[in-house]
Image (tube, rainbow, N blue to C red):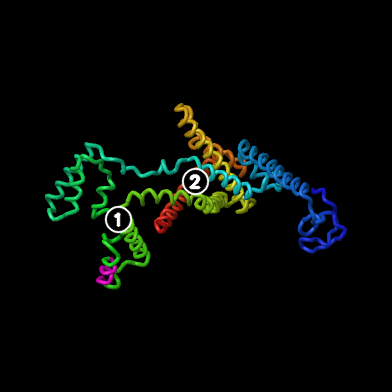
Amino acid sequence: MSHRPERKEKNCLNCGAIVQGRFCQVCGQENLEPKETFWGMFMHFFADITHFDGKFFTSLKDLLFRPGFLSAEYMRGRRARYLNPVRMYVFTSAIFFLIFFSIANLNDNFKVTGNEPLTARERSRRIEKVQDKIKEDSTNTDLEKQLAILMDTSVPVHAMDLARFERDFTTVSTFGGTYRDMRQYDSVQHARPSGGRDGWLTRLWNKRAIQLNEKYRYKGYEAMEKLPELILHKLPYLLFVSLPFFAFILKLLYIRRKDYYYADHGIFSIHHYIFTFILILFTIFFGKLEDMTGWSIFEWLTILPIILVGPVYLFIAMKKFYRQGGGKTFVKFLLLNLFGAILLITLLLAFFLFAIFQL
């Protein structure tokens, strides 16, 4: 509650309703003088921050150490002392992805290898392969250029130096054949009878694949490095999209429980996602400690949260929130993980295809 003086007028400045007391009974706004001193504004800001912090840490403590309790409290209507689940999800996911993209070294982890200088053994093997191809096709000038580069031992050779002369290198494969360019593809399609031509989906894919193969014809490694980066930066959207589907799976698993609405499953899913974010942050933190110290204990602490803590926490949370026996909960726990994995793979495939069209 603010310490500013109450207005003498009884019309709410926010909605216009007649206020019966200090707070508007329609919109909840305090009926205070709108003018505010700098000190008053600062104290208001400080109170909002500490109020948010208090609710956040209370919610976080119960979320981490009392599986299923926070969701059950929300379902019972005890919400004043806890942070709203949606606000908590937005805040936690923002912190998670900020740290994830800042310190997880994604560029190193997903960097495509193969563009380092060839070793003497690798160079020798490539020379033999190129010489064999020249015997089969002596008119191929690109093979002669590759051989000249490989035979020059005075300079290091990279895979990309040779890729410039690869005629059969493709970034993305096409369906129904290999096409050099769009003109060839259109020519093949026109030559076929109307019933034998590619459908609209195949045609859409093939045209995009041909464009990418032309764009990255001599820099395929660049495409292979850019694609994982595009997918990873879509991860926040993927998780956000998966959340209502995850709640729908829970709805199906507990469809006979009429006292649980879809929104209740949604609240449980949000709290589970928040816990997962925090768990992954711990694995990243222990992974960094392992890199700095070289101690194997941190390797175990990186693996255990994912393979042990996460599943055990989810099982206990389901058992306490849905109030069913251990046997039923375990079966539904297994089904949830199975359908959840299928959902994740499907969404990853969808986002992969989306990233292809953004390359």
Q: Secondary structure at mark 2?
A: helix
Foreground pick, 280 / 313: 280
Image quadrant in which you'd find residue 35: bottom right
Foreground pick, 31 / 190: 31
**Dot 2: within a 10 Å radius of its alpha carbon, few (fewer than 14), some, or many (20 or more) residues?**
some
CA gap, disc 1 and disc 2:
45 Å
Q: Is residue 24 magenta?
A: no
Q: Position of residue 354 (x, y in %)?
A: 43, 57
Is 326 above or below relative to 148?
Answer: above
Chain part drawn in magenta: 185-192
Image quadrant in which you'd find residue 180: bottom left
Q: Position of residue 76 (x, y in %)?
A: 69, 47
Q: Amino acid type of disc 2?
A: Leu
* Residue denoted by label 1: 217
Q: Is residue 61 left or right of residue 121?
A: right
Q: Position of residue 309 (x, y in %)?
A: 53, 35
Q: Is residue 187 magenta?
A: yes
Q: Amino acid type of disc 1?
A: Arg
Query: Image point 47% across, 30% down: which residue?
Result: 292
Q: Main secondary structure of the magenta part?
A: helix
* Residue denoted by label 2: 335
Foreground pick, 319 / 310: 310
**Dot 1: within a 10 Å radius of its alpha carbon, few (fewer than 14), some, or many (20 or more) residues?**
many
